Amino acid sequence: MKQFEPTITRAILLLSCATLLAPGCANFEDGTTSYERRDYEGALKHFEPLAEKGHPDAQFLLGRMYAEGLGVTSNETTAAKWFLKAAESGHADAQYRIGVLHLDGEGASQDPPQGVEWIRRAAEQGHRLSQFSLGWLYDFGVLGENSEEAATWYGRAAEQGVSIAQYNLGCMYLDGRGVPQSLEKAAEWYTKSAEGGYAKAQVRLGFMSDSGVGVEPDGQKALEWYRKAAEQGHPSAQYNLGVAYDIGEGVETDLVQAHLWFNLSASHGDDDARERRDCVASKMTDEQISRDERLAVGWRRVEPETEELHLAKVIAAQPSRPSSVNVFRPKEAERLFESLRDTGIER
């Protein structure tokens, strides 16, 4: 088997709405309704006057509209202006976004220390993505290699359900980096990550279940995790399922299933899977080959989910502010990872 500073809280905002700013808040709610309906022209009419009067949430969403060209011509400089205004009022999402803009120099001056400072402010407010980002930056030495700080920030994000942070924290426990080595703790965090749908964690947990590392040996549980990851397009999990069906480990021998999973793994460039597929094919009857071809029609080649896409889904599913509009936008996560890759850092 392969291993593989002050903050304007929502309560204060709502109290203000209930007293002096009730009409403006009504306009904001109308704006978010339009935004959710993708009526961006309508949203713009509500957000612009509110943003000019200093409404942080309207400033943030207006910044997002300019950043992503929603009902307006995309303009990173204008987006940065509104993100900065909201960030200066303590808006965590905006602090994160202006931080990322300073990291990659789009719409704002390229100033990594300033970018990191904004991301840190957001992280200290509990912003999930910012916490994960700080963990990543410490993990890979951008802020000076500091495994203890990396583990601390991964841990804060992990406690809030960020699957990639849970996975990375599991890796730190497995290796004993920044935390005392503990196979059991590693398995605990891999399990949380795997249950959140992160394929890498599912594969790692499958191996640990298979070999009894950090958990009780459980071949059936290992197969369940491999299958979950394989169905997301993870080539190593597909390979391991192929092996199981080829030799009848935990399942009945089934050359058709073995060929299917080896073939899917090979489509990602795995030479071992290609060899195993061809070996299995040599043992198949004409009837089995015909059955395999029919079965393959129901499958398409699934690309493994990128870390940035997975993280964006996590963040979109769990808005960090009650007023955030929950519309899936992967761009913010993609940009963070692009910025990190520009420094030559990849996991």
Image (cartoon, helix red, strand yellow):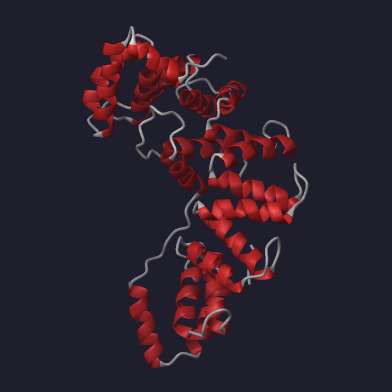
Determine whether 234 is above or below 86 in the image. Answer: below
Residue 275 in view (yes/no) = no
Q: Nearer the viewer, residue 142 or 23?
A: 23
Q: Where the N terminus falls, by quadrant?
A: bottom right
Q: Going 68% across and 66% down the picture, which residue do you hit?
A: 216
Q: How far across and down, in percent of the image, does residue 274 sit?
A: 53, 75
Q: How far across and down, in percent of the image, does residue 140 sit?
A: 67, 40
Left/right placement of residue 200 relative to residue 64 reads: right
Left/right placement of residue 256 relative to residue 22 reads: right
Q: How far across and down, in percent of the image, does residue 60 sit?
A: 40, 22
Q: Going 56% across and 22% down the picture, which residue do you hit?
A: 118
Location of residue 55 by image quarter: top left
State the residue lying farthest toward the top.
20
Q: Nearer the viewer, residue 110 or 20?
A: 20
Q: Going 60% across and 65% down the picture, which residue do you hit?
A: 206
Location of residue 123 by image quarter: top right
Location of residue 201 by image quarter: bottom right
Q: Going 36% across and 77% down the picture, which residue do you hit?
A: 295
